[in-house]
Amino acid sequence: MDFDKINIVKEPTIIFMGTPDFSVPVLEGLISKYKVRAIVTQPDKPVGRKGELKPTPIKEVAMEYNILCLQPVKIKDALQEINALEPDLIVTCAYGQILPLELLLIPRLGCINVHASLLPKLRGGAPIHRAIIEGHFKTGITIMYMAEGMDSGDIISTKEVIIEEDDTAASLHDKLSVVGRDLLLETMPSILDGTNSRTPQDESEATFAFVIKREDEKLDFLKTKRQIVNQVRGLNSWPGAYCVFEDKVMKVWKCKRGENIFDDKFPGEITAIYDDGFGVKVGNGEVTFTEIQLAGKGKMKASDFVNGHKDLVGKILK
């Protein structure tokens, strides 16, 4: 997209709120066209064995561009400081906290959000994961006004994105972050001059994409081939689907639908060895695991795992 073709309506005071990698292209696009007065992100978190504090991806952008960065533990603790900046507009993208009404009322042009779904579908914190896990064929980006309810505000603009058969949460994440950047920049001029559309969401069509929990990661071999494959795709590259092999956690990073039925096998039973991995009995047939990871080990091709584990056929994954 050619950022230079987008006209700046005025020099508004903008505050950006975001935290993860997904927000980075959106923020960088905004910086390319507008003056971002301040950035609000989550506090630094300890990482690694030494527990060293690591800045959020958005804080790293703030440091690169020398922009004021606020990191309140609770957003209410920063209300006074945000209000003092007298923002015209607050733009949020995957910030990570629910914004109180007091904050939504601060900017004269309101608070807008870049959300990774076609609202009112998939409201909540894991719309990318859930879109694939639930077998959606399309998703997209919604630019919306923020309201007190979860992702319930009026829709300003949307852009559809097709979910390809080989998409994972990681690949879809990257596509949507770029679409989010472009759609925001296309929509900003109309927001700033007050000519944008504003469409209330149809509450009867609302669905929810709740954050991924540990129980969402566990494979249930009673499910269908399509459900298993979608779950694996939807949890790649984080946090990963898993099962248990000989009392050890086995992450499953890639798998595909098989053609064989194996009516005489139990769900979770290893059915056969193939050139690219090994088959596992599921509810309506078989899936083939092609990339796995045992606890404490690195990712590996399932075919390499087969070479180091004899007599796999007949063993049960739980």
Image (spheres, helix red, strand yellow):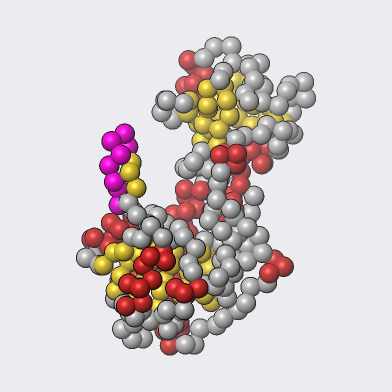
Q: Is residue 232 visible?
A: no
Report if residue 54 lies within the magenta region: yes
* Quadrant of image for the C terminus: top right
Q: Is residue 82 above or below residue 230?
A: below
Q: Which residues are magenta?
A: 48-55
Q: Taking 189 as reference, is 269 above or below it?
A: above
Q: Given the current orientation, which residue lies at the most extreme top position?
A: 311
Q: Is residue 126 left or right of residue 22?
A: right
Please tell me which residue is depicted at 34% across the width and 54% down the height of the picture. 43
Q: Quadrant of residue 207?
A: bottom right
- Work out whether residue 83 or residue 230 is closer to the camera in this orientation and state it: 83
Q: Residue at x 53, y 56 (%)?
A: 125
Q: Position of residue 115 (x, y in %)?
A: 51, 64
For residue 177, side relative to residue 62 (left or right):
right
Camera-side residue of 252 and 262: 252
Residue 14 figure quarter: bottom left
Is 121 colored magenta in this rendering? no
Q: Quadrant of the N terminus?
A: bottom left
Q: Quadrant of residue 262?
A: top right
What is the count of numbered marks?
0
Q: Nearer the viewer, residue 228 or 41?
A: 41
**x and y percent of residue 288 in the render?**
60, 30
Q: Residue furthest right?
A: 263
Is 172 in front, or is 156?
Answer: 156
SS majority, magenta = loop
Could you tell me if residue 152 is visible in this image?
A: yes
Q: What x and y, as percent, mark residue 232? A: 57, 39
Residue 16, given in percent of the width and then of the height, sits at 37, 69
Residue drawn at 45 percent across, 58 percent down? 96
Q: Which residue is rendered at x = 56% and y = 43% of the image?
A: 213
